[in-house]
Amino acid sequence: MSAGAARPVGPEGAPAIAPDPATGLPRLPLARLPTPLEGAPRLAAALGLRALFVKREDLSGYALGGNKLRKLDYILADALRAGADTLIGTAGAQSNFCRALAAAAAKTGLGCRLHLRAQARPPLQGNLLLDHLFGAQVTFTSRSDPWDPAIADELGGIAEEVRAAGGRPRIVQLTGATAGLGAAAWIAGAAELAADWAAASRGSPSASSA
């Protein structure tokens, strides 16, 4: 199969990996895009603006939505094309990104290991509760700095555990190897916003429109 060919993944009827028109990178279209661009005229008036528009990323789809789903379309495509069967992610204990990562793994039939930053074991609530409900296996690190190289070493140790059990891990770290894919998602997002604005016949969006 060629690198640019669409590839079915997950259960029957799941979306296929295909090149994204804006970036040329493989994307798994799990997110519900484009998200709406909605006018907020009353809020604009209250702020003394001529017009105000809100890009409704909360409507992007699964796991309560949010802009993290854009990144995951690329990250999941990359992991699946590499043959991974387990995603390993890290962030804070109430991370929106890790909540979405756990849900994306569940949607595509992948395992998920989350290594979350917390000085003490936090209560099982909020996003942490959702991580568990989505089937993620959660461990904690006392490291507080997401750029600490020790976290990368700890993720590597988890990856070795997965390999020892016969799995094929893929580390997802937005401050590390996955940073480029996360940024690429917003190249496509910017193109989408430009198309939204053009469809509304409002020229180019800028702060000067106030």
Image (cartoon, grey):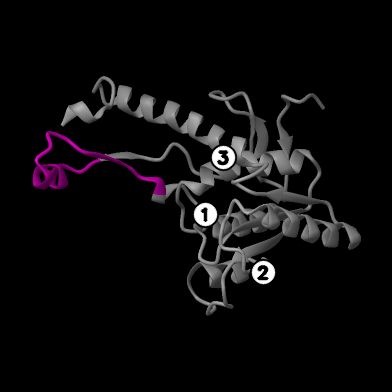
| Comes first in the chain, label 1 or label 2 | 1
Instruction: Check residue 207 for magenta coloring.
Output: no
Q: In this view, does 200 lie to the left or right of 167?
A: left
Q: Is residue 39 above or below residue 167?
A: above
| Residue 176 at x, y percent in the picture | 64, 44
Magenta region:
39-57
Magenta span contains residue 45: yes
Q: Which amino acid does label 3 sit on?
A: Gly
Residue carrying label 3: 182
| Residue 199 position by quadrant | top left
Give me the C-alpha separation between circle 1 and circle 2.
20 Å
Asked if residue 110 shows in the view, the reply is: no
Q: Looking at the image, is mark 1 or mark 2 nearer the viewer?
A: 2
Q: In the rendered image, which quarter is residue 24 located in?
A: top right
Q: Which of marks 1 and 3 is nearer the N terminus?
A: 1
The local secondary structure at tag 3 comes to helix
Image mark for residue 136: none
Query: Residue at (68%, 41%) from the top-left corner?
Result: 177
Q: What element carries label 1?
A: loop
Tell which circle, 2 or 3, labels the residue nearer the N-terminal end.
2
Q: Do the residues labelled 1 and 2 touch (CB within 8 Å)?
A: no
**Residue type of the residue flagged with mark 1:** Tyr
Q: Distance between the residues labelled 1 and 3?
A: 18 Å
Label at residue 62: 1
Q: Which amino acid does label 2 sit on?
A: Val
Q: Mark 2 points at which residue?
A: 138
Instruction: Out of 181 and 110, give the one closest to the viewer.
Output: 181
Cβ–Cβ under 8 Å for marks 2 and 3: no
SS at badge 2: strand
